[in-house]
Image: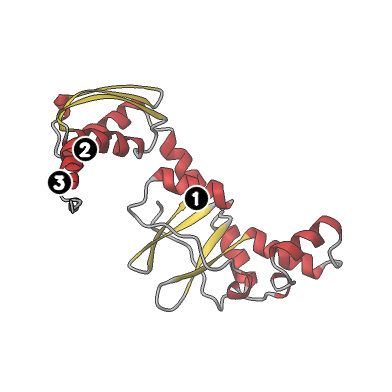
Amino acid sequence: MSRNVVTASPETPLKDVARLLCDNNISGLPVVGADGAVVGVVSEADILWKEIGLAEPPRGLVDWILEHAYGDDTRTRATTAGEAMSSPALTISPGDSVTHAAELMAERFVNRLPVVENGRLVGIVARADLVRAFKRSDEEIEREISEEVLRGALCVDPDTVSLAIAGGRVSLAGTVENRSTARLVEALVRRVPGVVSVRSQLQWEIDDGARRTRASADHLPRRMTP
């Protein structure tokens, strides 16, 4: 994410918002309240609605979009960021994966996601950031899996796991302590930026999943015989 975020307040005039977008070569920015909370996002598209309002009354497709997207012409009458913004803002947290951010952008048709921690803006992720993350080399991906996922997050010796990476496609082999760890390795590797797919052939010494199932069954209430 980018930590130096260009923002506006709800009271910022739209002309100043347009200037911020142009001067910083960005297509949208978060609208932040006095307490640092993100209250919305204003984009080039929001300013475009203002331009539509200044032109001839909308007809045809534009008329349909206005009616179905907003229900009235509020955006065309906006003069401040707070009046023009999309709200509530769609946000993510610093711990969310790149995959989750990409899914949100694709599903909700947004180009940027403010990053919020403890209710306050700490950064922003744009589509360009995700593209840069996705083009990482196989060597960078292998390094993150070995050092941050295996050794750092799971306390697994990287030498016990065989990694093969080609074009972002990851193959896992080797033996770990238990079945739940094997599942965690695969799940966390899938979240590493740049990973396209994961094929896991990890083995385990202890099937703790089966042990938990038996333990749960032992705690089920017994049927009383009359």
Q: Where is mark 1, residue-wise?
A: 104
Farthest-out residue, front: 226
Asked if 102 appears above or below 62 in the picture, the reply is above
**Front in this rendered view, residue 214 or 49:** 214
In the rendered structure, which disc, 2 or 3, sits on the residue that comes first in sequence? 2
Residue at point 62% right, 64% down? 18
The numbered dot on residue 218 is: 3
- Indicate the colouring scheme: secondary structure
In the rendered structure, which disc, 1 or 2, sits on the residue that comes first in sequence? 1
Amino acid residing under circle 2: Ser
Within-10-Å neighbours for mark 1: few <14, some 14–19, many 20+: some
Where residue 78 appears, x then y in whole percent? 68, 74
- How far apart are labels 2 and 3 at the CA level? 20 Å
Residue at point 69% right, 62% down? 69
Q: Where is mark 2, residue-wise?
A: 180
Amino acid residing under circle 1: Leu
The numbered dot on residue 25 is: none
Relative horizontal placement of residue 25, taking residue 197 as reference (left or right): right
Label 2 element class: helix
Residue at point 20% right, 33% down? 179
